[in-house]
Amino acid sequence: MKLGAGDEGKGMEIEASIRAFVARNLLFTEDGYSYPDESSFLREGIIDSLGVLELVDFAGTTFGIRVDPTEVTPENFDSVTRLAAFVRRKQASGPSASGERACVGS
């Protein structure tokens, strides 16, 4: 399911998608995401360097944004809250910031 800029009014769907992805793909649980949305993925040991790449790919694919390598920072990717805010900023900045795939290293 791809959530685009027109879906912003759907409340907390971005956060819910991030929580579900992290629970299933990084915590390997079907019991849901049990941390507060502000919890640091790094400090809590939820994510490692490979997990960051998975999260970048997920954000680009799911939300239709282009992620520049310089944007892969703790300020943008270190919690549900920070990632959701990053996604909303990218979606709001228009078509030049959106793309079909995440860009991680080119």
Image (cartoon, rainbow, N blue to C red):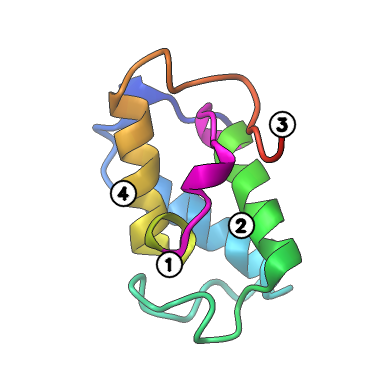
Q: Nearer the viewer, mark 1 or mark 3?
A: 3
SS for callout 1: loop
Query: x and y percent of residue 29 in the render?
Result: 69, 75
Q: Which residue matches tag 3?
A: 106
Q: Looking at the picture, tell me which residue is in the foreground, 71 or 21.
A: 71
Real-space CA distance between mark 2 and mark 3, rounded to the nearest whole angstrom: 25 Å
Point out the frontmost of discs 4 and 3.
Answer: 3
Please name the residue that numbered disc 1 is placed on. 79
Mark 2 vs mark 1: which is more N-terminal? 2
Q: Give the range drawn in magenta.
A: 62-74
Query: Mark 4 and mark 3: span between their CA atoms?
Result: 24 Å
The amino acid pointed to by label 1 is Ser
For marks 2 and 1, give the CA distance: 12 Å
Q: Earlier in the sequence, mark 1 or mark 4?
A: 1
Q: Where is residue 24 in the image (x, y as percent from the top left)?
A: 68, 64
Q: Quadrant of residue 95?
A: top left
- SS for callout 4: helix
2 and 1 marks in contact (CB < 8 Å): no
Disc 4 versus disc 2: distance between alpha carbons?
16 Å
Q: How far apart are marks 1 and 4 (CA)?
A: 10 Å
- Is residue 10 among the parts visible in the rendering? yes
